[in-house]
Image: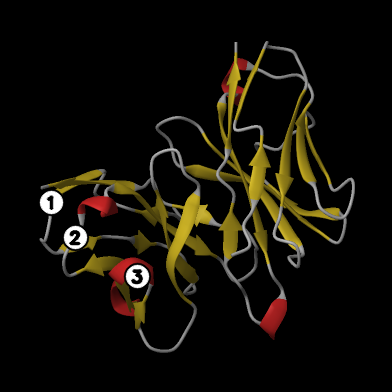
């Protein structure tokens, strides 16, 4: 069964460093997302991406964040200068557009980011 | 305020007992409704969804959910819980004019043998 994959599973970085979180969405999906979950809190939407551009972003997704689909398979989230409060589990998700109806989002296993 | 509410933070049940997890939403129009499960160290897995039609929907792992428009609720049920159902359960919605999931705060289910 196709699945969303994410690497690395755990990333430890120093405050102020840049990190890139990587995701491989399901191959025929066209809509891509990043969410995050701070420990003990609910899952929060960061950004959605379609047709090589951001379609929606939350207030959390400020200038420190960027997303990219550098090739036909990867979808990345970059944090330019990490802060302590960026420590969280980051989930990638993807969605198909097949069938002409809204389809559910499929999630990856997450990358746990720890900023020291 | 517009939100997704899961009033139960933590629920403990005995194996074999029935289960109901509550979810309420407060939006003007009925959103698309979802239940996801997160096992420890795992990602989010979709249990079931409701878009329209029959208000009782069946999902994976023996779960079902009932949409009640009058109560703005979408409660998750299972007639007999298994120890492997211990996990965190999230109710989520997608509003008609967006493409993002809005999650509730989650309910942690603990199952005793």
Quick one: SS at disc 3? Answer: loop
Image mark 1: chain:
B
- Where does residue B14 sit, x and y in percent of width and height? 10, 52
Disc 1 packing (10 Å; few <14; some 14–19; many ≥20): some
The residue lying at 68 percent from left, 10 percent from top is: A14
* Distance from the alpha carbon under mark 2 to that under mark 3: 25 Å
Could you say which quadrant of the image residue A68 lies in? top right
Decide: marks 2, 1 in contact (CB < 8 A)?
yes
Q: Is residue A92 left or right of residue A55?
A: left
The residue lying at 89 percent from left, 50 percent from top is: A71
The residue lying at 65 percent from left, 47 percent from top is: A5
Same chain for the residues under marks 1 and 3 in the image: yes
Quick one: SS at disc 2? Answer: loop
Image mark 2: chain:
B
Q: Is residue A8 left or right of residue A87?
A: right
Decide: marks 1, 3 in contact (CB < 8 A)?
no
Badge 1 or badge 3: first in the primary sequence = 1
* Distance from the alpha carbon under mark 2 to that under mark 1: 8 Å
Quick one: SS at disc 1? Answer: strand
Quarter of the rendering occupied by the N terminus of chain A? bottom right
Residue B81's tag is: 2
Residue B13's tag is: 1
**Would you name the residue on which mark 3 appears?**
B72
Image mark 3: chain:
B
Q: Does residue A113 appear in this view? A: yes
Badge 2 or badge 1: first in the primary sequence = 1
Q: Nearer the viewer, residue A18 or B55?
A: A18
Could you say which quadrant of the image residue A65 lies in? top right
The residue lying at 13 percent from left, 64 percent from top is: B18
* Distance from the alpha carbon under mark 1 to that under mark 3: 25 Å
């Amino acid at each position: 069964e196709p699945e969303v994959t994410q690497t690395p599973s755990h990333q430890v970085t120093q405050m102020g460093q840049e990190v890139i979180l990587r995701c491989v969405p399901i191959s025929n999906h066209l809509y891509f997302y990043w969410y995050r979950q701070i420990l003990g809190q609910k899952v929060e939407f960061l950004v959605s991406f379609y047709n090589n551009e951001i379609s929606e972003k939350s207030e959390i997704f400020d200038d420190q964040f960027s997303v990219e689909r550098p090739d036909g398979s990867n979808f990345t989230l970059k944090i330019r200068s990490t802060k302590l409060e960026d420590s969280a589990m980051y989930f990638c998700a993807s969605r198909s557009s097949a069938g002409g109806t809204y389809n559910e989002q499929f999630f990856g296993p997450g990358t746990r980011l720890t900023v020291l | 305020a517009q939100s997704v509410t899961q009033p139960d933070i933590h629920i403990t049940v005995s194996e074999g007992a029935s289960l109901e997890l509550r979810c309420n939403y407060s939006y003007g129009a009925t959103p698309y409704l979802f239940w996801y499960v997160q096992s420890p160290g795992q990602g989010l897995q979709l249990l079931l969804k409701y878009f329209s039609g029959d208000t009782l929907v069946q999902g994976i792992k023996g779960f079902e959910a009932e949409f009640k428009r009058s109560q703005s609720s979408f409660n998750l049920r299972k007639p007999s819980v298994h120890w492997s159902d211990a996990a965190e359960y999230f109710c989520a919605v997608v509003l008609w004019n967006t493409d993002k999931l809005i999650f509730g705060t989650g309910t942690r289910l603990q199952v005793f043998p």
